[in-house]
Image (cartoon, rainbow, N blue to C red):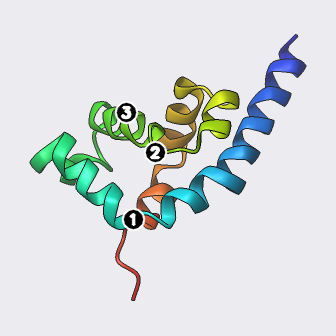
Amino acid sequence: MNETLADARKFASHLIEEHALPFLSDRVDDLKLLLHDKLGHAVVDLAHNEAVGRMAFESLYEFLPAPVRLIVKREMFTRYCLENKTRILALLEPKV
């Protein structure tokens, strides 16, 4: 049973990395507006405050393509993002 759960998490992580993150990185400006609207000044706490991060990543979930949302549930996506928030937040940094 634990092996099945580990396989499901690995598959979900693969989907997020291959489909969700590139999709989100292509929409950086929209995501920044969404985060600012949802969090206001708390957006600066995103990297350091788990509650703010959870709220932000739950909001980002809505931007995922429907086929990805059908397979990767909100909690799994949020957990992945919290565990990899440095990498996710790097996507939101301005590209030079």
Q: Which residue is mark 2?
A: 63
Residue 54 tag number: 3
Picture residue at 44% right of the left edge, 37% below the top:
62
**Closer to the camera: disc 2 or disc 3?**
2
First in sequence, mark 1 or 3: give its number: 1
Q: Residue furthest left?
A: 41
Q: Position of residue 33 (x, y in %)?
A: 24, 56
Picture residue at 70% right of the left edge, 30% below the top:
71
Cα distance between the residues tagged 2 and 3: 15 Å
As helix, strand or loop, the secondary structure at mark 1 comes to helix
Residues under numbered marks 1 and 2 in contact, where contact means CB atoms less than 8 Å apart? no
Q: Which residue is mark 1?
A: 28
Residues under numbered marks 2 and 3 in contact, where contact means CB atoms less than 8 Å apart? no
Determine crowd level at label 3: few under 14, some 14-19, many 20+ residues with C-alpha closer than 10 A.
some
Q: Position of residue 13 (x, y in %)?
A: 70, 42
Cα distance between the residues tagged 1 and 3: 18 Å
Determine crowd level at label 2: few under 14, some 14-19, many 20+ residues with C-alpha closer than 10 A.
some
Tell me the amino acid under the disc marked 2.
Answer: Phe
Q: Nearer the viewer, residue 29 or 41?
A: 29
Tell me the amino acid under the disc marked 1.
Answer: Val
Q: Position of residue 92 (x, y in %)?
A: 38, 64
The answer to whether 80 appears left or right of 10 in the picture is left
Picture residue at 60% right of the left edge, 26% below the top:
73
Q: Position of residue 65 (x, y in %)?
A: 58, 44
First in sequence, mark 2 or 3: give its number: 3
As helix, strand or loop, the secondary structure at mark 2 comes to loop
**Closer to the camera: disc 1 or disc 2?**
2
Image vertical order of residue 78 relative to residue 85, above or below = above
